[in-house]
Image (tube, coloured by chain):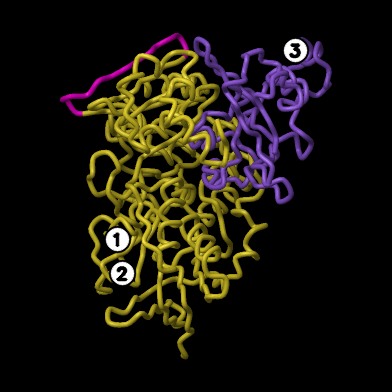
Amino acid sequence: MKKIHIHEEYCIGCRLCEINCLVKHSRSGKIVKAFRGEEPRPLPRVRVEEEGYLSFALQCRHCDEALCLENCPTGAMYRDEETQAVLCDENKCVGCWMCIMSCPLGVIKREEKTKKVASKCDLCRGETPVCVKNCPNEALTYE
Amino acid sequence: MNDIETRYLLVGFSVAGWWCARTIRERDRKGKIVAITKENGIYSPPLFTYYLGNRVSDIRYRPEWIENLDLDLIYGGEAKTLEKENNRLILSSGESFVFEKALIATGGLPVAPPLPGKELEGVFTFTTPRDMQKVSEFMKHHRVERVTILGGGFIGLKTAEAFIELGVKVTLVELANRLLQNMLDEKSSYYLESALNRAGVEVIKEDTIVEFQGQGGKLTDAILKSGEHLPSDLAVIAIGVRPNIDWLRGSGIEINRGIIVDEFQQSQRPDIFAAGDIAETKNLITGERNVVAIWPEAVKQGKVAGENMTGSRVSYPGSLPVNTVSVGEVALISAGLVNPPLGDFELLTEVTNDSYRKLVLKDGYLVGMILVNKIEKAGIYINLIRQKVKVDDFKDRLLKEDFGMISLPAEYRKHLVEGASIEV
């Protein structure tokens, strides 16, 4: 299975990964609409962490032993057989936040109003992830 | 009746049994597994209240996976006797099983005090699919406008959450002076209580129900110790669950509050393991033995038992109480030691208008936390508690807005992220 690899020494903290991820997972797929016209506003599923000169982009690792999946009581969190990605079926999610409680990297976010998991990397459902594709300095690679 | 022979026997088949079966199957593709459940399906207990609140229509647990497990499933089977001298289990139906290894995961039973009037129509407990069906049926056939819940613990709160979604007037009665006293401190239970009040729930503390009264066999009032009468169309007794261990008396299995197991989830009968709401394990932080009846520990214990039943020697690090509850727009997550005794504990707190965070440290390690509303980093903190990572060097950053993986020691951060084959 292909994974997103993080190379912090190349990350320049530009956050293009966050922007591209947000737009990719918006309803319109358009940057201006995604930022200004959609309610709830889509969230990026990758997070850039920054401290001094150090930065890196972090998204779900699709762990082999995925605690979010093990601890999901509804079965909403599942592993896609083809990509091996851990995905969330929003129809089944009840917003109990067991996944948020379980993720050791803190990369799952919630949609407070609709009580659904709002932000969880889906590896762009099989395509090369847009965070990787749009990284200007190869700080994220997919292999 | 002839014995049914099996390599693995799983007695009780909820989440602990399910993850045990899955783990066994990954390691032993052929060995026969018989799983016995007293229910007529395989259910996810946390969904019962969500079903009641119309958030889900299916309470089964991962039905799409069950075939892959290649189990001989026995529904409606109630374990009656575990023979002391032999690896033989007998059901109430008379069916008997001879096993090489067994997992006991028969879960818990609701604690039901002998309250006068609890047999009235309209008074329920709420821990099984049957309870859930009975409450749903009752709701269909009766006008239910006022619900009284006895118990401000976890099940009481989840039940209240469901009735709030249905737009019913809820009164919650709790004997202690605050809600969820095991998982929250005073301040955080105040946030919870305010959220309940905003959702229209009346919370009555330091009082309890002493009697249910009715007319024509149907509930009309819950009577409080203080003398107050609460007109009620429906009442739920939710004061807790206890391990379902009575049937094991005489089996030679050592029992205290639950089945006493070692770090391998093994009872002192080496072929017999236990996991989930019936197993008494060591607390990860305090070392005290206790039954921690929550989903994540049931999964972990089931997996450890499964590995060890197939011949490995894998140990369970100890139980960590973790809980999450949401009411209206208030979400709470707590873990570990949240009300530390007086002593060498350090508390880090942050309070805003609509959020509260408290971290409990001991000797430079995180041992407990409560998060109200700012919950998204819960998993990072809980992992630091579980893995016993020393946080002394970065404790001043723990509550910063930009706290994240970047705040952790580089070595540890890389190890965590690499865990899933990543190079940082």
Q: Is residue B19 left or right of residue B385?
A: right
Say which amino acid is labelled 2.
Leu
Chain at tag 3: A
Q: Which residue does the image show at 61% across and 40% down from the upper left?
A: A62
Q: CA distance from mark 3 to mark 1?
A: 55 Å
Chain displayed in purple: A
Tags 3 and 1 in contact by the CB under 8 Å rule? no
Q: Which residue is mark 2?
A: B248
**Residue B28 vertical position relative to residue B409 in the rendered view, above or below:** below
Q: Which residue is mark 1?
A: B259
Instruction: Tell us which disc is closer to us: 3 or 2.
Output: 3
Q: Give the magenta-colored segment's residue range.
A: B341-354
**Residue B379, horizontal then vertical, whole percent:** 47, 32
Q: Which residue is mark 3?
A: A35
Q: Which residue does the image show at 37% across and 24% down from the upper left?
A: B189
Say which amino acid is labelled 1.
Ile
